[in-house]
Image: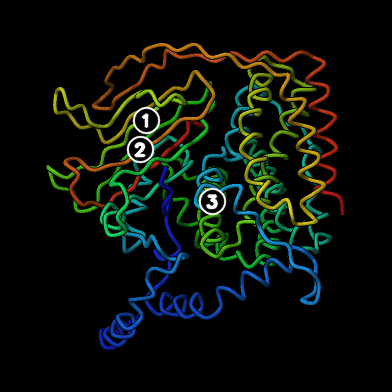
Amino acid sequence: MITSRTYLLNLKFLLLLLPLLFHPAIIFPDCSSNDLFFDNCARNLNEYTFLKSYQFDQSQLKKLGLRPTVKYSSIFSKGSEYFFSVCNENRTDNNKMILKLYDSNERLITSTYDPVFNRYFSKFKFPCRRTGVYYIEFSFQGALDGCGAGMVGIKM
Amino acid sequence: MVNMNSSKSIFKHLKLNAFISLFITVLFFSTSCQKKQTLTENGSTPETKVAKPDTTVIAPEVIDGLLHSIPSPLEISLLIKKTVVSFISDITNPYTNCDNYTTPFKQAVNLGVYSADIGYLGLYNKQTVSTLYVRCLRKLADELKVGQFFTSEKLQRARTYSTHPEQQDSLLTLITMSFEEMNEYLNEKNRRNVSVLIVTGAWIEALNLSLKVYEQNPSQALLERIGEQKITLDNIRLVLSVFKNFPEFAPLIEHLDELKKVYDRVVITYTYGEPEFSEEHGMLVVQDKSTSKVEITPDILNDIRALTIRIQKLVTAV
């Protein structure tokens, strides 16, 4: 266990090393400081089996001058039921993480946020009927800084 | 497309002291570590010519994204389980081969192979034999210096993710979760050659298992999944092409190129349909109206089977 004194000493040492933060190997540090947030998010999967996870730290992207959204590709299979869950860290009403799912032609399939009715869903299920590449995009409502995680589960 | 830290990063698992150590290690040894790994992968000595990844083909960030996009072996095992009720024994790579994989190339590719085997065994609740395979997987992971992703603490943690925390379910979660973390770690350490081999090995074994199961229990759903591997094969070939200058990769790439030629004869057609939505207990449910259809003749299937057996033998030979 780290004592507060050791912690401060380590912190000072860490600050000295701060300029090294942008080494390519550590360019995207995690916004979540412990396992608890991730584990709680993973528990949302319930009867679905853990398949993939994504972490999204918008402030890091902004610092690096990158677009405040991030998009991943993933291959999903026909006949499988996928479950998507998003978890915000320090969530406020105006700062929710949005997950958008697109097909291989980048046509929007669904989003966790419905701007027409101003409704937010933290999870959705997607029974896939078409095998192929899909795109998962993360952003934050109102382009505010935020940190969160996205989970994908599959039905056993 | 921006590829960033896509899953739980290594930093989350380290306390501050370890984090600082990592800084120092990364700072002073990153270049030498990369070179050492390249040498090891290459099986060369420092005096011989060193092969380097051809990053002009694909940027490292894109490789990471492609690797993350490839379905885990768990998915294909799930499909096998869904379509075939009975377990077929003796179709996995024997765990007794484990000790004979002594080169990093063989260790990495067979770490992938065994992960697919564990997925298959786990879904049929073959607990005793699964344990032997897990031991083997841990051994290979230790040899590759990624044993930290397959500890019993990890298994305990994986157990809490499921509402049905019986052993096998947790084991599958552990394998999937650990793979994700391990690949991310390897990519951060510029050891993408290792992660590419692990993912490739897992995919080859999953395809091999599907073909063997299909041979004994043919089903349209499984046949379509075998045909759909055309999409994943494209991604795997793309990431492998970065390492085409590595002598040990060459036979594997050549075989997969041959397999690609066979898969080119598989026709996949798509029909787009506007998705519909409903709500179940506050959860959004997407009704996918798009469909895909796979056309694969018995001749093509036989060619895929013959080549997959050859490739599986190539990677698992001791």
Residue found 37% across the figure and 30% down from its top? A101
Q: Residues within 10 Å of mark 1 (few under 14, many from 20)?
A: many
Q: Amino acid at mark 3?
A: Ala
SS at mark 3?
Answer: loop
Amino acid tagged 1? Leu
In this picture, residue A31 sits left or right of residue A75:
left
User: Which image quarter is the N terminus of chain B in?
Assistant: top left
Depth order, front residue of B289/B96: B289
Q: Amino acid at mark 2?
A: Glu
Residue reaching furthest to the front? B56
Residue at 25% x, 56% y: name it.
A59
Instruction: Name the one closer to the observer, B106 or B158.
Output: B106
**Label 2 or label 1, whichever comes before in sequence order:** 1
Q: Which chain contains the residue that carries disc 2?
A: A
Q: Chain of mark 1?
A: A
- Counting the numbered discs, the total is 3
Q: Are marks 2 and 1 in contact (CB under 8 Å)?
A: yes
Q: Quadrant of residue A138?
A: top left
- Residue to which mark 2 is pinned: A137
| Residue annotated with mark 3 | B59
Q: Is residue B289 above or below residue B307?
A: above
Q: Which residue is mark 1?
A: A101
Q: Position of residue B275 (x, y in %)?
A: 36, 15
Residue B138 image point, x, y percent: 66, 60
Looking at the rendered image, the disc whose residue lies closer to the viewer, 2 or 3, is 3
Distance (Cα) linking label 1 and label 3: 24 Å
Could you say which quadrant of the image residue B310 lies in?
top right
What whole-number distance in Å separates the C-alpha atoms at marks 2 and 3? Answer: 20 Å
Q: Are marks 2 and 3 on the same chain?
A: no
> Badge 3, how many Cα within 10 Å: few under 14, some, many 20+?
few
